[in-house]
Every structure is written in structure tokens, then in C-alpha cells.
Image (cartoon, rainbow, N blue to C red):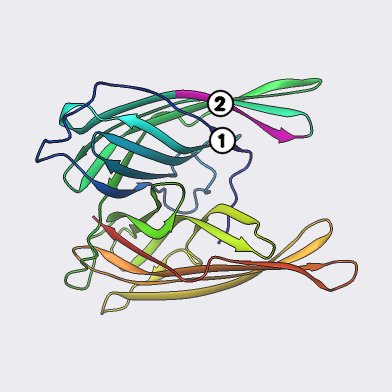
Amino acid sequence: MRRPFAGCVLVGLLVVGATASAQDPAAPSGNYGGGLVALPPAPIVSAGNMLVGLRVTGAQVQVNASMGASCATAALRAATARIEAGGVFKARGSGRAHLGTGRLATTRYEIDGTITGATASGTASSATTITGRRRRASRCSSGTVMWGARRSNGDIGAPGVAPDARMYGTTTQRLGGPRRAIVLRASADGSKLARALYDVTLRCAGGRTITDIYDAPRRNLTIASDGTFSDVERFTLREANATVRFTERFSGTIGAAGASGTLSTQERSVSRRTGRSTGSCSSGTVRWSAAP
């Protein structure tokens, strides 16, 4: 279900680090995705949820990330960092975003990671201060969280998943260079998909796009004996001038070696005054894959 991050903050990166040799035979390459996902009932807008997408080319890594906190979310887009020997990269930066009604959010953040073979992991943190006219400044922080990412090869393996397993991967959509990220978490007994968190972009009539973060249509989705799961959710949001109807689909197969499937989201807006359609947006069918 769509859970838009409140006060999305777009920030840029200041990167540091020495360059690794692009000739290193063990040097990482390609697209990695994942992050961190908290079990329900923790809300999406919380420090326990994060998505990160990486694209490694030679001795550079492009970084996209979305980090939850209580008052706002830092959205890090199209950042480029140098990779040190051993696959290590470090990113430091700050940025500002206008949130409307005279409010300004200033976010400072750090993302550190190590990329080895098909695996990436590290820590991240963000701190945001929101100021406004005649308002007391408010502050929030993500704290330091640990994230993981994988370069999934699409393997699934034997049906079934380990208790409380996490899987990290990418979708076929891109935002800039990196592919969009997805992260899944199984229930404590491995019988259900407790939550899947993913980035998705919807394209609308007239060329407008919507980029948002969603979790799977239904939490604690039962995994069948053959490893498959599938769900459809339809719901309505009533806004000031329009009623927006959503349809979300999420399905896949999960096994000991990984998971793969498809997802899609559609929105249709209807004027509350006239009852006529005012526009529609759709992601189309998006493929995804993930690995433990």
C-alpha cells in the first residue's frame, strides 16, 4: 500500500575517498539494490526503513537512497562516490528542500558502504531540521542504520524461505543510473511475506511522473508450498478536490536462493465536484528480483 514519505527531501552528495584501480579483477560492477525493512506494525515513515540503489561502473558508484525518520525523509538521488581499495565508499552531504507553507528542510547525511562481489552493506544516517515562518524549528534523525544490498542473478532455488529472512534486490525501473531498489522480509516462521518495500515511478497523462515508496499490497502475505505469493489491493484516498483510486499488484516466487516476480501500481483521479476523470498514472508491469 502506498505510504508516501512526509516531506521528501532532495539532497546532493559531497563525496570523499581515494580511487580504486579499475583493473582489479575482484572489483564490483553492475546494479545492486536493497536497504532495510522493519516488520509491521512499524510505519513506513520510520528509521527502520530504507531503500538504497547502487550502480558501479569502474571505480565509481552512483547512489540513490531513501531514508525514513519521524519528521521527514531524506531522498538522495544520482549521487556519485569514488570507490576505495577493498570496495569501500564514503559519502557526506547536505541539502535543502522547500516543503510548502513557508517551511524549509535542511538535511545532513552520511552513507558508508563496502561492495564485494555481488554483496554490498554499510551504515547510513540522516539528520533534518525544519524551519518555517513564525514557527519553532523541529528536528529529527534516522539514527545510524545498517543496510544491505545485492546484485541479484534471478536464482530462486528450492521453494521455502528461512525464518525472518531478508532479501535485497532491484527492479527493472531506473532512477538516473541505478535500478530501483526492493527489499523483502519473511515472517518469524518463514511462512509469510511480512513486508516488501520498494521504489516505483508512475507515468501520467501529459508526461508527468510520480516517484514514491510503497510496501506490498498486504502485509503477512501467505507463501504457498511452491514458494509463490500474489495479492491485489484496491483503495481510495479522498483529497481536497479529487478522489484518487489505487490498484496495486504484487506477486512472485521465493526460495532458498532468492526471489523474483512482478509489481504494478495504477492511480485514477476523479473530480469531487464534477465526478469526471482528471487523470491517470501507471507504473506498468515492473519485474523484480532479490537475493538473501
> Which percent across, then down, holds residue 135?
77, 22
**Viewer-proximal residue among 233 and 42:** 233
Circle number at residue 10:
1
Q: Specify the farthest residue to the left.
A: 25
- Examine the structure image and report whether residue 47 is included in the region drawn in magenta: no
Quarter where residue 79 is shown: top left
Identified by mark 1, the residue type is: Leu
Q: Specify the farthest residue to the right.
A: 273
Determine crowd level at label 2: few under 14, some 14-19, many 20+ residues with C-alpha closer than 10 A: some
- Examine the structure image and report whether residue 98 is included in the region drawn in magenta: yes
Residue at 49% of width from left, 48% of height from top? Answer: 42
Determine crowd level at label 1: few under 14, some 14-19, many 20+ residues with C-alpha closer than 10 A: some
Assign the magenta stretch its main secondary structure: strand
Q: Report the quarter where the N terminus lies.
A: bottom right
**Viewer-proximal residue among 140 and 16:** 16
Bounds of the magenta segment: 93-100
Horizontal relation, residue 279 to residue 55: left or right: right
> Which percent across, then down, holds residue 226?
26, 79
> Which percent across, then down, holds residue 272?
85, 66
Q: Are marks 2 and 1 in contact (CB under 8 Å)?
A: yes
Q: Which residue is mark 2?
A: 95
Residue 6 vs 132, above or below: the answer is below
Identified by mark 2, the residue type is: Gly
Q: How many marks?
A: 2
